[in-house]
Amino acid sequence: MASDDKHEAPPHDEEADEPLGPVTPDEETDLGDTPEAHDEISPHDLPKDHPGRREAERQAEEEGTTRGNV
């Protein structure tokens, strides 16, 4: 099948600063992780009947969030 130049995406400008989207390479973030994700949770992120809610509340007493049992 021949390529139709009208339908090809323009090449990315190597000098542009805009992100490429969710697949933008990031040297500081592990593969599969995303820089937009956060590692902390608030106990309010868990339903009141969640088995881990009490432990999350205990760990978050000082700062309001917890990174869990890292």
Image (tube, rainbow, N blue to C red):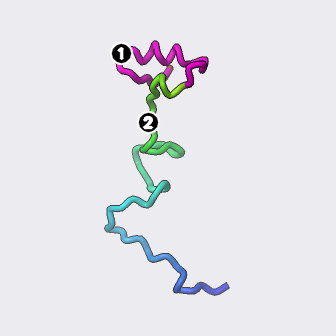
SS at mark 1 in the image: loop
Provide residue 15's location: percent of width, then percent of height: 32, 68
Q: Residue at x 53, y 86 (%)?
A: 5
Provide residue 37's location: percent of width, then percent of height: 46, 40
Q: Residue at x 47, y 45 (%)?
A: 34
Magenta residues span 47-68
In the image, residue 52 lies in the stretch drawn in magenta: yes
Q: Which mark is residue 62?
A: 1
Q: Is residue 31 above or below residue 39?
A: below
SS at mark 2 in the image: loop
Which image quarter: residue 40?
Answer: top left
| Kind of residue sitting beneath label 1 | Glu
Q: Is residue 22 above or below residue 67?
A: below
Q: How many marks?
A: 2
Which image quarter: residue 17?
Answer: bottom left
- The span from disc 2 to disc 1 (Cα, nearest Å) is 18 Å
Q: Is residue 1 above or below residue 63?
A: below
Per the image, the residue denoted by label 2 is 38
Provide residue 27's location: percent of width, then percent of height: 41, 48
**Magenta span main SS:** loop
In the image, residue 26 lies in the stretch drawn in magenta: no
Q: In the picture provided, is 1 more to the left or to the right than 55?
A: right
Q: Say which label, 2 or 1, has the lower sequence index.
A: 2
Provide residue 46's location: percent of width, then percent of height: 54, 25
Number of other residues with Cα within 10 Å of mark 1, as a class: few under 14, some 14 to 19, many 20 or more: few
Q: Front-most of 25 and 48?
A: 48
Q: Residue at x 44, y 15 (%)?
A: 59
Q: Quadrant of the N terminus?
A: bottom right
| Kind of residue sitting beneath label 2 | His
Q: Residue at x 52, y 85 (%)?
A: 6
